[in-house]
Image (tube, rainbow, N blue to C red):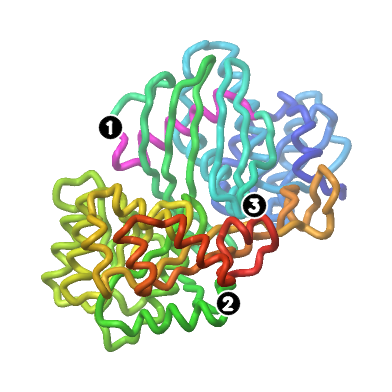
Amino acid sequence: MQILNDEALTQMTVSQAGLDLCVTFSDRYMQDDVAVLISAEGMLIASLPAWQHHFIALLNIVAQTTLNGFVITQWCLANARSIRNLLHDTTAQDLQSTSRELIELDHTRAQQALEDLVQQALVLQASDIHLLFSPSHAALQFRVHGRLVGKVERNRESMAGAIAAALNTRSEDFHELFDEQRLSSASISMSLLHSECIQRIRLRVQKSPTRNGFAVTMRLQQEQSKILRLHELGLKTEVISKIKKILTEPSGLLIVAGPTGQGKTTTLAALNAEIPSTAKVISLEDPIEIIQPNIEQKPVIAEHHELNFANMVKVALREDPDVISISEIRDEATAKAAFTAALTGHLVTATVHAHDTFGVLSRLLDLGLTAESLAQFGVIRGILAQRLVSKMCLDCEGTDRGCPRCHGSGVVGRQLVCEFLLVNEKIRQALQSKQFECCRRELIEQGWLSLDEQLSRDFSCA
Protein backbone atom coordinates (compact mmCIF):
# COMPACT_ATOMS: atom_id res chain seq x y z
CA MET A 1 0.00 0.00 0.00
CA GLN A 2 1.42 3.38 -1.01
CA ILE A 3 1.89 5.99 1.73
CA LEU A 4 1.21 9.59 0.67
CA ASN A 5 2.75 12.53 2.53
CA ASP A 6 1.00 15.89 2.89
CA GLU A 7 2.81 17.42 -0.09
CA ALA A 8 1.80 14.57 -2.40
CA LEU A 9 -1.78 14.73 -1.17
CA THR A 10 -2.13 18.44 -1.90
CA GLN A 11 -1.30 17.70 -5.55
CA MET A 12 -4.27 15.33 -5.82
CA THR A 13 -7.61 16.16 -7.41
CA VAL A 14 -10.63 14.76 -5.61
CA SER A 15 -12.95 12.75 -7.82
CA GLN A 16 -16.64 13.63 -7.81
CA ALA A 17 -17.32 9.89 -7.90
CA GLY A 18 -18.25 8.87 -4.39
CA LEU A 19 -17.54 12.36 -2.99
CA ASP A 20 -20.73 12.42 -0.95
CA LEU A 21 -19.98 8.93 0.39
CA CYS A 22 -16.48 10.00 1.44
CA VAL A 23 -17.69 13.21 3.11
CA THR A 24 -20.42 11.36 5.02
CA PHE A 25 -17.97 8.63 6.08
CA SER A 26 -15.31 11.13 7.22
CA ASP A 27 -17.81 13.30 9.11
CA ARG A 28 -19.28 10.27 10.88
CA TYR A 29 -15.94 9.17 12.33
CA MET A 30 -14.06 12.49 12.51
CA GLN A 31 -13.41 12.15 16.25
CA ASP A 32 -11.53 8.89 15.65
CA ASP A 33 -9.12 10.30 13.04
CA VAL A 34 -10.94 8.38 10.32
CA ALA A 35 -11.14 9.89 6.83
CA VAL A 36 -11.28 8.76 3.21
CA LEU A 37 -11.33 10.27 -0.28
CA ILE A 38 -11.19 9.07 -3.87
CA SER A 39 -8.76 10.81 -6.21
CA ALA A 40 -9.37 11.51 -9.88
CA GLU A 41 -6.46 9.15 -10.56
CA GLY A 42 -8.46 6.22 -9.15
CA MET A 43 -6.87 6.06 -5.71
CA LEU A 44 -8.83 5.22 -2.56
CA ILE A 45 -6.92 7.22 0.07
CA ALA A 46 -7.76 6.53 3.72
CA SER A 47 -6.22 7.11 7.14
CA LEU A 48 -4.66 4.27 9.13
CA PRO A 49 -7.56 4.02 11.64
CA ALA A 50 -9.96 3.80 8.69
CA TRP A 51 -8.07 0.84 7.24
CA GLN A 52 -7.71 -0.81 10.65
CA HIS A 53 -11.24 -0.43 12.03
CA HIS A 54 -13.58 0.32 9.11
CA PHE A 55 -12.28 -1.87 6.29
CA ILE A 56 -15.73 -3.25 5.43
CA ALA A 57 -17.14 0.28 5.15
CA LEU A 58 -14.29 1.19 2.78
CA LEU A 59 -15.09 -1.86 0.64
CA ASN A 60 -18.71 -0.68 0.48
CA ILE A 61 -17.53 2.71 -0.82
CA VAL A 62 -15.42 0.94 -3.46
CA ALA A 63 -18.39 -1.23 -4.47
CA GLN A 64 -20.84 1.68 -4.76
CA THR A 65 -18.31 3.76 -6.70
CA THR A 66 -17.70 0.85 -9.10
CA LEU A 67 -21.46 0.50 -9.66
CA ASN A 68 -21.48 4.18 -10.64
CA GLY A 69 -18.85 3.50 -13.31
CA PHE A 70 -15.67 4.69 -11.56
CA VAL A 71 -12.99 2.04 -10.94
CA ILE A 72 -10.60 2.15 -7.97
CA THR A 73 -7.14 1.03 -9.11
CA GLN A 74 -4.98 1.69 -6.04
CA TRP A 75 -5.29 1.81 -2.25
CA CYS A 76 -3.25 4.43 -0.38
CA LEU A 77 -2.57 5.60 3.17
CA ALA A 78 -2.50 9.26 4.31
CA ASN A 79 -3.02 11.50 7.33
CA ALA A 80 -6.69 11.96 8.35
CA ARG A 81 -6.34 15.70 8.88
CA SER A 82 -4.87 16.22 5.42
CA ILE A 83 -7.60 14.10 3.82
CA ARG A 84 -10.30 16.17 5.54
CA ASN A 85 -8.60 19.41 4.46
CA LEU A 86 -8.79 18.29 0.82
CA LEU A 87 -12.43 17.20 1.24
CA HIS A 88 -13.38 20.53 2.85
CA ASP A 89 -11.74 22.51 0.06
CA THR A 90 -13.44 20.42 -2.64
CA THR A 91 -16.93 20.65 -1.14
CA ALA A 92 -16.46 24.40 -0.64
CA GLN A 93 -15.57 24.80 -4.33
CA ASP A 94 -18.73 22.90 -5.26
CA LEU A 95 -20.82 25.25 -3.17
CA GLN A 96 -19.08 28.27 -4.67
CA SER A 97 -20.13 27.19 -8.14
CA THR A 98 -23.79 27.67 -7.16
CA SER A 99 -23.47 30.73 -4.89
CA ARG A 100 -21.17 33.74 -4.83
CA GLU A 101 -22.08 34.68 -1.25
CA LEU A 102 -19.93 33.72 1.75
CA ILE A 103 -20.67 30.03 2.06
CA GLU A 104 -22.62 28.68 4.97
CA LEU A 105 -20.88 25.38 5.59
CA ASP A 106 -22.41 22.89 7.93
CA HIS A 107 -21.21 24.02 11.37
CA THR A 108 -19.90 20.61 12.39
CA ARG A 109 -17.76 20.35 9.28
CA ALA A 110 -16.57 23.96 9.48
CA GLN A 111 -15.57 23.55 13.11
CA GLN A 112 -13.71 20.37 12.24
CA ALA A 113 -11.80 22.31 9.56
CA LEU A 114 -10.61 24.76 12.23
CA GLU A 115 -9.74 21.94 14.64
CA ASP A 116 -7.66 20.27 11.94
CA LEU A 117 -5.88 23.58 11.37
CA VAL A 118 -5.08 23.88 15.08
CA GLN A 119 -4.00 20.23 15.22
CA GLN A 120 -1.56 20.92 12.41
CA ALA A 121 -0.23 23.92 14.34
CA LEU A 122 0.26 21.76 17.44
CA VAL A 123 2.18 19.15 15.46
CA LEU A 124 4.45 21.89 14.10
CA GLN A 125 4.78 23.45 17.58
CA ALA A 126 3.55 26.71 16.06
CA SER A 127 2.76 29.78 18.12
CA ASP A 128 0.55 31.48 15.51
CA ILE A 129 -1.60 30.66 12.50
CA HIS A 130 -1.64 33.24 9.69
CA LEU A 131 -4.35 33.35 7.02
CA LEU A 132 -4.32 35.93 4.23
CA PHE A 133 -7.51 35.96 2.16
CA SER A 134 -7.44 37.19 -1.43
CA PRO A 135 -10.32 37.03 -3.93
CA SER A 136 -9.16 33.64 -5.24
CA HIS A 137 -7.70 31.76 -2.27
CA ALA A 138 -6.47 31.80 1.32
CA ALA A 139 -2.71 31.71 1.97
CA LEU A 140 -1.88 29.71 5.09
CA GLN A 141 1.33 29.96 7.12
CA PHE A 142 2.46 28.99 10.61
CA ARG A 143 4.92 30.75 12.88
CA VAL A 144 7.25 28.03 14.16
CA HIS A 145 10.05 28.95 16.56
CA GLY A 146 9.89 32.55 15.38
CA ARG A 147 9.78 31.83 11.63
CA LEU A 148 6.88 31.85 9.16
CA VAL A 149 6.85 28.45 7.46
CA GLY A 150 4.72 26.13 5.34
CA LYS A 151 3.02 28.58 2.99
CA VAL A 152 0.22 26.78 1.15
CA GLU A 153 -2.92 27.84 -0.67
CA ARG A 154 -6.24 26.71 0.80
CA ASN A 155 -9.75 27.12 -0.51
CA ARG A 156 -10.98 30.59 0.39
CA GLU A 157 -14.57 29.62 1.17
CA SER A 158 -13.59 26.63 3.30
CA MET A 159 -11.25 28.68 5.49
CA ALA A 160 -13.59 31.69 5.71
CA GLY A 161 -16.44 29.39 6.68
CA ALA A 162 -14.31 27.74 9.37
CA ILE A 163 -13.34 31.10 10.90
CA ALA A 164 -16.89 32.46 10.75
CA ALA A 165 -18.40 29.32 12.29
CA ALA A 166 -15.85 29.28 15.10
CA LEU A 167 -16.37 32.96 15.95
CA ASN A 168 -20.14 32.59 15.89
CA THR A 169 -20.36 29.40 17.98
CA ARG A 170 -17.20 29.08 20.08
CA SER A 171 -16.28 32.62 21.05
CA GLU A 172 -17.61 34.22 24.22
CA ASP A 173 -16.58 37.74 23.26
CA PHE A 174 -17.51 37.95 19.56
CA HIS A 175 -20.88 39.72 19.41
CA GLU A 176 -21.27 40.83 15.80
CA LEU A 177 -22.02 39.48 12.36
CA PHE A 178 -19.00 38.10 10.55
CA ASP A 179 -17.88 40.81 8.14
CA GLU A 180 -14.65 40.44 6.18
CA GLN A 181 -14.13 44.20 6.03
CA ARG A 182 -14.56 44.93 9.73
CA LEU A 183 -11.71 45.11 12.22
CA SER A 184 -12.43 42.71 15.07
CA SER A 185 -10.75 40.62 17.74
CA ALA A 186 -12.02 37.73 19.81
CA SER A 187 -10.98 34.59 21.64
CA ILE A 188 -11.95 30.99 20.90
CA SER A 189 -11.64 28.13 23.39
CA MET A 190 -11.44 24.48 22.39
CA SER A 191 -10.31 21.10 23.69
CA LEU A 192 -8.40 18.79 21.35
CA LEU A 193 -6.92 15.33 21.61
CA HIS A 194 -3.19 15.75 20.99
CA SER A 195 -0.33 13.41 21.89
CA GLU A 196 -2.80 11.03 23.56
CA CYS A 197 -4.10 13.63 26.01
CA ILE A 198 -6.71 16.38 26.01
CA GLN A 199 -5.21 19.80 25.31
CA ARG A 200 -7.16 22.92 26.22
CA ILE A 201 -6.40 25.62 23.67
CA ARG A 202 -7.30 29.28 23.58
CA LEU A 203 -7.02 31.13 20.28
CA ARG A 204 -6.64 34.88 20.27
CA VAL A 205 -8.07 35.90 16.93
CA GLN A 206 -7.36 39.21 15.20
CA LYS A 207 -9.13 39.98 11.90
CA SER A 208 -8.46 43.04 9.75
CA PRO A 209 -9.26 44.15 6.17
CA THR A 210 -6.55 44.28 3.50
CA ARG A 211 -6.37 45.87 0.04
CA ASN A 212 -8.18 43.01 -1.68
CA GLY A 213 -9.40 40.76 1.13
CA PHE A 214 -8.73 40.31 4.81
CA ALA A 215 -6.19 38.79 7.19
CA VAL A 216 -6.67 36.58 10.23
CA THR A 217 -4.00 35.88 12.83
CA MET A 218 -4.66 33.28 15.52
CA ARG A 219 -2.29 33.03 18.48
CA LEU A 220 -2.29 29.64 20.19
CA GLN A 221 -2.26 29.72 23.97
CA GLN A 222 -2.03 26.25 25.43
CA GLU A 223 -3.02 25.50 28.98
CA GLN A 224 0.10 23.70 30.16
CA SER A 225 0.57 21.48 33.19
CA LYS A 226 4.37 21.11 33.07
CA ILE A 227 6.37 23.86 34.76
CA LEU A 228 10.00 24.26 33.76
CA ARG A 229 12.36 25.04 36.63
CA LEU A 230 14.95 27.80 36.43
CA HIS A 231 17.80 25.40 35.61
CA GLU A 232 15.74 23.95 32.73
CA LEU A 233 15.30 27.35 31.07
CA GLY A 234 18.97 27.61 30.11
CA LEU A 235 19.99 30.25 32.66
CA LYS A 236 23.57 30.27 33.90
CA THR A 237 24.26 29.15 37.45
CA GLU A 238 25.29 32.62 38.69
CA VAL A 239 22.09 34.16 37.30
CA ILE A 240 19.97 31.49 39.00
CA SER A 241 21.76 32.15 42.30
CA LYS A 242 21.03 35.89 42.11
CA ILE A 243 17.38 35.26 41.24
CA LYS A 244 16.92 32.76 44.06
CA LYS A 245 18.40 35.24 46.54
CA ILE A 246 15.89 37.88 45.40
CA LEU A 247 13.05 35.39 45.84
CA THR A 248 13.95 35.12 49.54
CA GLU A 249 13.47 38.87 50.02
CA PRO A 250 10.26 39.93 51.78
CA SER A 251 9.42 42.67 49.27
CA GLY A 252 10.36 44.33 46.00
CA LEU A 253 9.88 43.90 42.26
CA LEU A 254 11.46 41.12 40.17
CA ILE A 255 10.67 41.80 36.52
CA VAL A 256 10.92 39.64 33.38
CA ALA A 257 11.14 41.62 30.13
CA GLY A 258 10.95 40.93 26.42
CA PRO A 259 8.68 41.20 23.38
CA THR A 260 5.59 39.06 22.80
CA GLY A 261 6.24 35.36 22.32
CA GLN A 262 9.66 35.29 23.99
CA GLY A 263 8.87 32.94 26.88
CA LYS A 264 8.13 35.47 29.62
CA THR A 265 5.12 33.51 30.92
CA THR A 266 7.22 30.34 31.17
CA THR A 267 9.93 32.18 33.10
CA LEU A 268 7.37 33.78 35.41
CA ALA A 269 5.95 30.34 36.24
CA ALA A 270 9.49 29.09 36.93
CA LEU A 271 10.00 31.98 39.37
CA ASN A 272 6.76 31.13 41.17
CA ALA A 273 7.82 27.48 41.39
CA GLU A 274 10.82 28.54 43.49
CA ILE A 275 8.60 30.09 46.18
CA PRO A 276 8.32 27.72 49.17
CA SER A 277 4.91 26.17 49.86
CA THR A 278 4.82 28.00 53.21
CA ALA A 279 4.30 31.29 51.33
CA LYS A 280 1.02 32.37 49.77
CA VAL A 281 1.34 33.25 46.08
CA ILE A 282 -1.47 34.98 44.18
CA SER A 283 -0.99 35.01 40.41
CA LEU A 284 -3.02 37.43 38.25
CA GLU A 285 -3.11 36.29 34.63
CA ASP A 286 -4.68 37.23 31.29
CA PRO A 287 -5.18 34.45 30.35
CA ILE A 288 -4.19 31.53 32.58
CA GLU A 289 -1.80 29.51 30.41
CA ILE A 290 0.24 27.29 32.75
CA ILE A 291 -1.40 25.37 35.58
CA GLN A 292 0.65 26.11 38.70
CA PRO A 293 -0.09 23.87 41.70
CA ASN A 294 -0.12 25.33 45.22
CA ILE A 295 -0.71 28.92 44.14
CA GLU A 296 -3.89 30.93 43.64
CA GLN A 297 -4.31 31.70 39.96
CA LYS A 298 -6.91 34.35 39.23
CA PRO A 299 -8.10 35.21 35.70
CA VAL A 300 -7.91 38.87 34.74
CA ILE A 301 -9.79 40.71 31.99
CA ALA A 302 -7.68 43.73 31.08
CA GLU A 303 -10.53 45.94 29.81
CA HIS A 304 -13.05 44.98 32.51
CA HIS A 305 -13.98 47.70 35.00
CA GLU A 306 -13.60 45.33 37.98
CA LEU A 307 -11.45 42.43 36.78
CA ASN A 308 -8.59 44.51 35.33
CA PHE A 309 -5.02 44.12 36.59
CA ALA A 310 -4.89 47.27 38.73
CA ASN A 311 -8.09 46.46 40.60
CA MET A 312 -7.18 42.78 41.01
CA VAL A 313 -3.83 43.77 42.58
CA LYS A 314 -5.80 45.76 45.16
CA VAL A 315 -8.04 42.73 45.75
CA ALA A 316 -4.99 40.48 46.14
CA LEU A 317 -3.45 42.84 48.70
CA ARG A 318 -6.50 42.31 50.93
CA GLU A 319 -6.04 38.52 50.83
CA ASP A 320 -2.83 38.34 52.90
CA PRO A 321 -0.37 37.29 50.15
CA ASP A 322 3.38 36.89 50.46
CA VAL A 323 3.96 37.07 46.71
CA ILE A 324 1.87 38.66 43.95
CA SER A 325 2.60 37.60 40.38
CA ILE A 326 1.34 39.87 37.56
CA SER A 327 1.37 38.41 34.05
CA GLU A 328 1.87 41.86 32.50
CA ILE A 329 2.32 45.44 33.67
CA ARG A 330 0.83 47.22 30.68
CA ASP A 331 -0.67 50.50 31.92
CA GLU A 332 -0.17 53.26 34.48
CA ALA A 333 -2.76 51.96 36.94
CA THR A 334 -1.19 48.48 37.04
CA ALA A 335 2.34 49.92 37.35
CA LYS A 336 1.31 52.03 40.33
CA ALA A 337 -0.53 49.11 41.93
CA ALA A 338 2.53 46.86 41.55
CA PHE A 339 4.76 49.60 43.00
CA THR A 340 2.43 50.00 45.98
CA ALA A 341 2.42 46.24 46.59
CA ALA A 342 6.24 46.13 46.52
CA LEU A 343 6.49 49.15 48.80
CA THR A 344 4.09 47.73 51.38
CA GLY A 345 5.96 44.53 52.13
CA HIS A 346 5.15 42.15 49.28
CA LEU A 347 7.38 40.44 46.76
CA VAL A 348 6.04 41.09 43.26
CA THR A 349 7.02 39.14 40.14
CA ALA A 350 5.81 40.56 36.83
CA THR A 351 6.49 40.90 33.11
CA VAL A 352 6.94 44.10 31.13
CA HIS A 353 7.19 44.59 27.38
CA ALA A 354 10.63 46.16 26.92
CA HIS A 355 13.71 45.64 24.74
CA ASP A 356 16.19 45.04 27.57
CA THR A 357 16.76 45.55 31.30
CA PHE A 358 17.39 49.29 31.10
CA GLY A 359 14.40 49.54 28.78
CA VAL A 360 12.26 48.29 31.69
CA LEU A 361 13.33 51.28 33.78
CA SER A 362 12.41 53.65 30.94
CA ARG A 363 9.10 51.85 30.47
CA LEU A 364 8.16 52.20 34.14
CA LEU A 365 8.94 55.92 33.96
CA ASP A 366 6.75 56.18 30.85
CA LEU A 367 3.94 54.50 32.80
CA GLY A 368 3.90 57.30 35.35
CA LEU A 369 6.22 56.12 38.13
CA THR A 370 8.82 58.66 39.24
CA ALA A 371 12.56 58.10 39.22
CA GLU A 372 12.72 59.04 42.90
CA SER A 373 10.16 56.43 43.91
CA LEU A 374 11.72 53.65 41.83
CA ALA A 375 15.21 54.47 43.11
CA GLN A 376 14.23 53.74 46.69
CA PHE A 377 16.13 50.85 48.25
CA GLY A 378 14.33 47.53 47.87
CA VAL A 379 11.69 48.64 45.37
CA ILE A 380 13.20 47.04 42.23
CA ARG A 381 15.36 44.03 43.11
CA GLY A 382 16.27 42.66 39.70
CA ILE A 383 15.37 42.58 36.00
CA LEU A 384 15.73 39.68 33.56
CA ALA A 385 15.46 40.53 29.84
CA GLN A 386 15.23 37.59 27.47
CA ARG A 387 14.88 36.37 23.90
CA LEU A 388 14.27 32.98 22.34
CA VAL A 389 16.55 32.28 19.38
CA SER A 390 16.11 29.55 16.80
CA LYS A 391 18.14 26.34 16.92
CA MET A 392 18.95 25.27 13.38
CA CYS A 393 18.04 21.76 12.28
CA LEU A 394 21.34 19.98 11.65
CA ASP A 395 19.69 17.41 9.37
CA CYS A 396 18.81 19.98 6.70
CA GLU A 397 20.97 23.01 7.51
CA GLY A 398 21.94 24.84 4.34
CA THR A 399 18.95 23.64 2.31
CA ASP A 400 15.72 25.45 1.49
CA ARG A 401 13.16 22.67 1.86
CA GLY A 402 13.56 21.50 5.45
CA CYS A 403 13.11 17.87 6.46
CA PRO A 404 10.76 15.55 8.40
CA ARG A 405 12.67 16.13 11.64
CA CYS A 406 11.88 19.88 11.64
CA HIS A 407 8.55 19.54 9.73
CA GLY A 408 10.04 21.67 6.95
CA SER A 409 10.69 24.69 9.19
CA GLY A 410 14.50 24.46 9.26
CA VAL A 411 14.56 24.83 13.06
CA VAL A 412 14.15 22.30 15.88
CA GLY A 413 13.41 24.55 18.81
CA ARG A 414 14.58 27.70 20.52
CA GLN A 415 17.01 28.52 23.28
CA LEU A 416 17.06 31.31 25.84
CA VAL A 417 19.35 34.33 25.59
CA CYS A 418 19.19 36.81 28.45
CA GLU A 419 20.77 39.61 30.40
CA PHE A 420 20.25 40.02 34.14
CA LEU A 421 20.47 43.30 36.01
CA LEU A 422 20.85 43.16 39.77
CA VAL A 423 19.60 46.52 41.00
CA ASN A 424 22.25 47.82 43.41
CA GLU A 425 23.25 51.28 44.59
CA LYS A 426 24.96 52.11 41.29
CA ILE A 427 21.82 51.23 39.31
CA ARG A 428 19.62 53.21 41.71
CA GLN A 429 21.83 56.27 41.23
CA ALA A 430 21.59 55.89 37.45
CA LEU A 431 17.83 55.56 37.79
CA GLN A 432 17.53 58.70 39.88
CA SER A 433 19.63 60.69 37.41
CA LYS A 434 18.21 58.84 34.37
CA GLN A 435 21.76 58.25 33.09
CA PHE A 436 21.00 54.80 31.74
CA GLU A 437 23.42 54.76 28.80
CA CYS A 438 26.39 55.82 30.90
CA CYS A 439 25.59 53.11 33.43
CA ARG A 440 25.17 50.50 30.70
CA ARG A 441 28.55 51.37 29.13
CA GLU A 442 30.25 51.20 32.51
CA LEU A 443 28.76 47.76 33.21
CA ILE A 444 29.87 46.47 29.79
CA GLU A 445 33.40 47.74 30.43
CA GLN A 446 33.37 45.72 33.65
CA GLY A 447 32.48 42.53 31.75
CA TRP A 448 28.68 42.55 31.85
CA LEU A 449 27.27 40.94 28.70
CA SER A 450 24.35 42.85 27.26
CA LEU A 451 21.50 41.15 25.45
CA ASP A 452 22.37 42.84 22.15
CA GLU A 453 26.01 41.79 22.39
CA GLN A 454 25.04 38.17 22.99
CA LEU A 455 22.58 38.15 20.10
CA SER A 456 25.28 39.43 17.77
CA ARG A 457 28.02 37.12 19.13
CA ASP A 458 26.93 33.82 20.59
CA PHE A 459 23.90 32.52 22.43
CA SER A 460 25.39 31.99 25.89
CA CYS A 461 23.49 33.61 28.77
CA ALA A 462 24.99 36.51 30.73
Name the one closer to the observer, 447 or 321. 447
The reply to whether the magenta stretch includes residue 189 is no
Mark 2 residue crowding within 10 angstroms, few (<14) / some (14–19) / many (20+): some
In the image, which disc is placed on residue 236?
A: 2
**Residue under pointer 1:** 175
Amino acid type assigned to the residue bearing label 3 in the image:
Leu
Of circles 1 and 3, which is in front?
Answer: 3
Task: Kindly indicate whether the residue at mark 1 contacts the one at mark 2 (C-beta within 8 angstroms).
Answer: no
Give the farthest residue toward the bottom: 278
Whether residue 296 can be seen here: no
Q: CA distance from mark 1 to mark 3?
A: 31 Å
The residue segment tinted magenta is 154-174
Amino acid type assigned to the residue bearing label 2 in the image:
Lys
Amino acid type assigned to the residue bearing label 1 in the image:
His
Q: Identify the residue at image location x=67%, y=55%.
A: 456
In terms of sequence position, does the residue under pointer 2 or pointer 3 come before the other? Answer: 3
Q: In the structure shown, which secondary structural element does the residue marked by tag 2 occupy?
A: loop
